[in-house]
Image (spheres, rainbow, N blue to C red):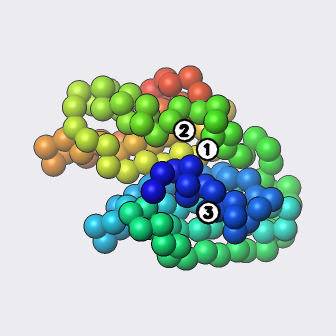
Amino acid sequence: MSQNRALKDFHRLYPNSKVTEIKLTIQHQSYIYDIVGYDTKKDCTIKINASTGEILGQSTLRNEDQEADTEEDTLQINKLVSRKEASQIAIQKVGGGEAREWTLAVTPSHTNPIWTVKIVDHNEVTKVKIDALSKDIINN
């Protein structure tokens, strides 16, 4: 299942929501999308099995603090580096390996959204952070 398809499922369930975070991680030997967002009244979360497209869970939490999330907190997906390109940048930075897990999120410590890519190379795990707009590597 593509990221775009997962986002469509999220927006089908939460039509007026804005996305703040997308994760693709391995859980129990399956890739799982975790998508987080909000609308004017609630925070929204969905888990989707990336292999089957099955919605594994969804939840909403009433947003008592409507000022908490702003337009700057949302991901403008079509303006950002793709997961594939972020993987290539991370693999090049590490000098080889395979991208295994990804997180795209807005963080308070950085102006632009950040890709965090987990690279596995010969049993060594490295996390690489990439500015999702400029493609710059972010040093911790």
Image spot of residue 19 (x, y percent): 68, 53
Q: Is residue 32 visible?
A: no
Q: Residues within 10 Å of mark 3 (few under 14, many from 20)?
A: some
Q: Secondary structure at mark 3?
A: helix
Write down the residue under mark 3.
Answer: 9
What residue type is disc 1 on? Thr
Given residues 129 and 97, the one toward you in this image is: 97
85 to 118, vertically: above or below: above
Q: Secondary structure at mark 1?
A: loop
Write down the residue under mark 1.
Answer: 107
Write down the residue under mark 2.
Answer: 114
Q: Is residue 79 left or right of residue 103?
A: right
Residue occupying the point 56% across, 49% down: 4
Image spot of residue 16 (x, y percent): 80, 59
Q: Which one is closest to the eye, mark 2 or mark 1?
A: 2
Q: Are marks 2 and 1 in contact (CB under 8 Å)?
A: yes
Given residues 72 and 3, the one toward you in this image is: 3
Q: CA distance from mark 2 to mark 1?
A: 7 Å
Q: Earlier in the sequence, mark 2 or mark 1?
A: 1
Would you identify the image quadrant in which residue 45 lies?
A: bottom right
Would you identify the image quadrant in which residue 124 lies?
A: top left
Q: Quadrant of the C terminus?
A: top left
Q: Residues within 10 Å of mark 2 (few under 14, many from 20)?
A: many
What residue type is disc 2 on? Ile
Residue occupying the point 40% across, 58% down: 25
Given residues 98 and 128, the one toward you in this image is: 98
